[in-house]
Image (cartoon, coloured by chain):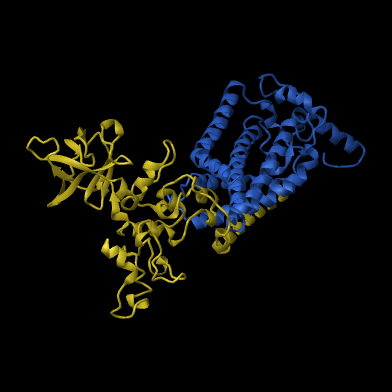
Amino acid sequence: MEKKSKALVALMLAVSVLSTACSSAKPLAPAPNSSAAEAQALDISKAAYVGSQTCISCHSNTIMDSFNKTTHAALFKAATAYPGLNLNQTVTIFDDGNKTKPVKLDLNLAQGDIKGVMADQHLVASLSQSTGFTSDNLGLYRIADLEKEGNAWKLTPAVEKDYDKNGTKDWGVRNYGDCATCHSPGLAAQALQAPGANKLTGGMSCETCHGPGGVHAATGSPAAIAVNEDSCYVCHAGGEKPADLTPEQSCLECHNPHGNARGLMFKEDTLSCESCHESGDSDPHHAVLKAH
Amino acid sequence: MNSLLVTLINYYIDFIAILFALAISGVVLGVAAHYFIIGPHGKELVKLPPEIIRMTLLERFTHFFRMVSCVLLALTGIVFATFKVNTLGLSYQWLLKFHVSLGIIFTISSLISIVIYFKPSFFKKYDWEWFKYMGGYLTKKEMHLPAGKLNAGQKVFFWLSGALSVLLIISGDILAFPQNYHINVAMAAALIHGLSALMLFAAVLGHAYLGTAANPGTFQVLLHGKVAREWAKTHHPEWVKELEQSSASGKTAVM
């Protein structure tokens, strides 16, 4: 090999090593100027949902670890998360919401469109209108309640009534669509989305609060994702910011919806109750939740 | 504009992974089919000693960095586009820094390459003869088609890769600092970046095949910068003529 070629190879190696070293040492970008970005007009309501797995592809998965311990994450889970729950059974159900005439259906749970379990209490399934069950606007029904016996879970009727007037109690199912908006908001949005569109997952997920993440995932733009307290009010505080809070005060000032290592959403690491309230003072902005 | 871009981004997210898979597998299958059905040309040229300087030190230097950065950018870019950063156990912040650092190397080496090969990439009349027979690549017969320092196919590759590189560099800069741009600009940049990368990587794979297995004796030029006289006469006869004329008139001493 000629001297020139040897020198060329040595130079290339040196530049490679240098560039790698430089790439890991320097900070890349300034902190996002989200205030300027948020000021830009943007409509991402038609953006695709990408799922929490896509979110944690870039964001730390420790967020998901702590979120999974919060009460938000426990709002709606897959039926498979309940040991001993027997879905290999057929139940004869009646539409409790249909007050004009009894509508009956033999539902094989293994073949049904089971969506999951709300708050460890209600087994939720989707029933098409062709079954005759039409009382729920989203086609979502509380098919059964869950009870824990020992370490195993079992199903019981959501409501028991004598629908067909034959002297015996029947297995009634209740509407879930109205509950879904808050108790499994992803499921409500899923039912409302057009067929074929990307779906928001059943329970609460990143995109439940942050909005559809497609544009943000593709661009990395902070303007393409919701980071504010607006989504809190979809379910909490009666749908609007409590009058007790000043305009400067925000839910997110005291709460981290991602939760901490213990799964608590109150920022206990930096705040205490007395940070905002005098000792013995009431907690007016939580009154709505307590009453509910 | 906004809703159109959002719709396009939705399609982009759904299909970019499969487009990459189709593009890469398509080129690989096409290349394999060409190699086994038609095969390489000028196999005997590989054994000839290198005599003529074809690539200067600067050309080899920039090609090396453009090649390495392009491949690593494509691989890391595919990881981003398919949202597999966490699945592969990588740090997003580290991978982004690595990707952008590679982008800087790619930018510098691409711009130097564009300057170096700009003039030799102007099409000449004899290039149409090369196009007419597609460089002889569609037949097993050895063809000696007219070509200057760059043949017509290489000129096409120059303009294509140059244009795509510029698009990638500009859109890449926007995506590295999306907070500084309007969301519509960022969305357009995302679409342009992904689709340009897709086309460039597919073209680069074909370029790599043509520079190695399809034309024995070519790849070595990246190491020592020289080619055999017969290789040059076979693949770039007009260039050899130009060199001989220049040498005869005393303008250059590259031979």
B161 or A65: nearer the viewer: A65
A189 or A201: nearer the viewer: A189
* Residue A183 x/y as whole percent: 31, 52
* Residue B29 x/y as whole percent: 54, 28
- Inspect this view and state whether residue A291 appears: yes
- Inspect this view and state whether residue A201 appears: no
Q: How many marks?
A: 0
Q: Which chain is blue?
A: B
Is B207 displayed left or right of B19 in the figure? right
Is A161 displayed left or right of B254 in the figure? left
B195 or A76: nearer the viewer: A76
Q: Which chain is yellow?
A: A
Q: Residue at x 23, y 39 (%)?
A: A98
Residue B67 lies in what quarter of the image? top right
Is A267 displayed left or right of A25 in the figure? left
Residue at the outermost left position:
A167
Q: Residue at x 74, y 36 (%)?
A: B227
